[in-house]
Image (cartoon, rainbow, N blue to C red):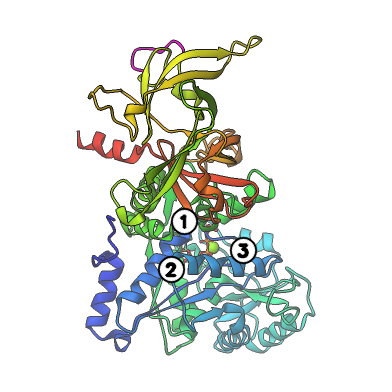
């Protein structure tokens, strides 16, 4: 496999960390964290961050990566999200060991830090309404205005903050703000809110708290409490770094991690934002977070992606400081490459056309030996039955073939994969519709195995299944979820859902697969010869009714793009 798993990785973040280790900064320790907010399932963008943070920890001696739930914002379904996130990180192949944390476990400590800031005259309770706070903030070109509450005494602030905690006030009536600079060119430093009142139960702390810390206050302190050395995050937090450092400096904490930002992953023809993905789920545009069309880890898994292919993809795209959009064809290229190595080859017919071999004995069945893999004999082989009545793919026959169509046509001979040459001698049509419903062919018994002793050639090899031996199956063909390259481009005021692809899912219910698939386990992956890579659906497939998902077709658009670029 063309994997970069074994080659040492370098990028600007790894370089910074290597320098720090060399200089014995943090006594040479490396501690990173992956800090998801449990408000949705993880997507492929998160995989980039997971591979980076867990990867860095693994590459450094004694390195550790924490999994921390950034659960400072109470909401209802968090438990489901927490469990899904843990499962997805594990499935990707990473292990947090004993280092599973929740920001909510630090609520008391964070509260005490806030009290400390008040005592130091660095934070105050502000009683402006949310709208007023916004209006006072100013703009990029205009400085903000001081809140009239900015000069409250330490005693009054301490009293009010304690009563906020005690639940004496309504949501939105007061907030705790940092006292920094309302004229700062960095808007984030214009007395940011540190705490707000929200009378909402929290999935872990229940009703213990009715004030909750804001991200910018909780995140840096959680990092510090856990002894994180390098706090890696995406570029949109670059402006927040000043506040990250301000909070830790003002509180004079022992551990002051270094925040480093990198470019988030963007993929074309999809969206990578939980806010948007949750909409697709809620509006039932997809069947759930794990719908195989979703760019979520669980969706990709159900689609048939391997964890290795996702990790390799993350290695390939690298870590940079500038935003860009990655072609989804690169992700598909990776899984195709991986499955080409490891997926057993089998035969399935998606849109069956009945073929009767007129000169084949009616009561005869042969067991032909088929290798599972063309170049990997270790994968072994299986017996595939051949009989008088077969199915081939409808699109492999044309009654009046145009020039470059080399497959089956009246009077023409083709090869059935690993079996025999057959020749079409008659076409049966539905009288009413004129549709071709059955072909009559003859076979040449001398061509068993797929080659003619007299050396005559055929121009096409078709896949097939024996009609009486084959098993019915449902096959789901997936295409891009969106028709536009950048669905998030809402310039024209368009909702991203307006460019959903109406043909993102095509369900075929009359497919026939070879009998060896009868016992296929959920999630097992195959190449259906000539069609693509498919996997057994983990949710809807059963022994009685098989369901396959198409992971990816055989056509490699990425290889084409590369070729075109070379030219
Ligand atoms: P979303 O925008 O999808 O809601 P988020 O940033 O709000 O994502 P978090 O749960 O806060 O989601 O993210 C956890 C970590 O994953 C953060 O460190 C974040 O920077 C990182 N991350 C999120 N999206 C991406 C992405 N597209 N590429 C790389 N890293 C990402
Ligand atoms: Mg976020």
Crowding near the residue tagged with mark 3, few <14, some 14–19, many ≥20 C-alpha atoms within 10 Å: many
Q: Which residue is mark 3?
A: 39
- Indicate yes or no: mark 1 CB to ligand 1 under 8 Å: yes
Viewer-side residue, 199 vs 400: 400
Image location (x, y in percent) of residue 56 = 34, 72
Image location (x, y in percent) of residue 463 = 43, 33
Which dot marks residue 44? 1
Q: Nearer the viewer, mark 3 or mark 1?
A: 1
Of callouts 3 and 1, the N-terminal one = 3
Viewer-side residue, 543 vs 502: 543
Q: Which residue is mark 2?
A: 93
Residue 508 falls in image quadrant: top right
Query: What residue appears at the point 61 percent right and 62 percent down from the top-left corner?
Result: 136
Residue 318 falls in image quadrant: bottom left
Label 2: element kind: loop
Of callouts 2 and 3, the N-terminal one = 3
């Amino acid at each position: 496999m063309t994997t970069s798993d074994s080659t040492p990785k370098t990028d600007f973040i790894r370089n910074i960390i290597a320098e720090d280790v060399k200089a014995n900064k943090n006594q040479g320790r490396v501690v990173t964290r992956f800090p998801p907010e449990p408000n949705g399932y993880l997507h492929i963008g998160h995989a980039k961050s997971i591979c980076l943070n867990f990867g860095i920890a693994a590459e450094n001696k004694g390195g550790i990566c924490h999994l921390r739930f950034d659960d400072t914002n109470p909401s209802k379904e968090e438990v489901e999200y927490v469990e899904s996130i843990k499962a997805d990180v594990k499935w990707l192949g990473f292990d947090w060991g004993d280092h599973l944390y929740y920001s909510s476990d630090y609520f008391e400590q964070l509260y005490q830090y806030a009290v400390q800031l008040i005592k130091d005259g660095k934070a105050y309770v502000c009683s402006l309404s949310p709208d007023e706070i916004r209006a006072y903030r100013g703009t990029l070109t205009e400085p903000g205005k001081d809140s009239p509450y900015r000069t409250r005494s330490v005693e009054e602030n301490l009293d009010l903050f304690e009563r906020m905690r005690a639940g004496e006030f309504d949501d939105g009536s007061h907030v705790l703000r940092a006292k920094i600079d309302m004229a700062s060119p960095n808007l984030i430093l214009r007395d940011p809110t540190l705490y707000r009142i929200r009378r909402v139960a929290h999935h872990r702390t229940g009703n213990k708290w009715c004030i909750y810390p804001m991200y910018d206050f909780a995140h840096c302190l959680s990092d510090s409490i856990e002894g994180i050395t390098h706090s890696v995050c995406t570029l949109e937090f670059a402006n927040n770094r000043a506040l990250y450092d301000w909070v830790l400096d003002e509180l004079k904490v022992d551990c002051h991690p270094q925040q480093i930002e990198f470019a988030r992953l963007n993929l074309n023809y999809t969206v990578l934002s939980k806010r948007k993905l949750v909409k697709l789920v809620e509006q039932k545009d997809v069947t759930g977070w794990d719908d195989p069309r979703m760019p979520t880890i669980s969706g990709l898994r159900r689609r048939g992606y391997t964890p290795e292919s996702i990790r390799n993809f993350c290695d390939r795209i690298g870590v940079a400081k500038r935003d860009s959009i990655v072609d989804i064809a690169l992700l598909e290229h990776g899984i195709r490459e991986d499955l080409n190595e490891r997926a057993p080859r089998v035969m399935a017919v998606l849109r069956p056309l009945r073929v009767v071999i007129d000169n084949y004995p009616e009561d005869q069945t042969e067991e032909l030996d088929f290798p599972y893999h063309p170049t990997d004999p270790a994968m072994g082989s299986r017996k595939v039955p051949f009989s008088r009545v077969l199915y081939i793919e409808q699109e492999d026959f044309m009654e009046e073939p145009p020039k470059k169509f080399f497959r089956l046509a009246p009077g023409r001979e083709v090869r059935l994969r690993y079996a025999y040459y057959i020749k079409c001698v008659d076409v049966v049509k539905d009288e009413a519709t004129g549709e071709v419903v059955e072909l009559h062919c003859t076979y040449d018994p001398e061509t068993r195995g797929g080659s003619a002793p007299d050396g005559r050639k055929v121009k096409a090899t078709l896949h097939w299944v024996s009609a009486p031996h084959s098993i019915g199956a449902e096959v789901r063909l997936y295409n891009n979820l969106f028709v536009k390259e950048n669905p998030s481009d809402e310039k024209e005021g368009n909702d991203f859902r307006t460019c959903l692809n109406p043909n993102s899912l095509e369900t075929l219910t009359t497919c026939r697969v070879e009998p060896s698939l009868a016992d296929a386990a959920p999630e097992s992956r195959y190449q259906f010869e000539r069609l693509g890579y498919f996997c057994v659906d983990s949710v809807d497939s059963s022994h009685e009714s098989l369901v396959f998902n198409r992971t990816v077709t055989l056509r490699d658009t990425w290889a084409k793009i590369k070729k075109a670029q070379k030219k």
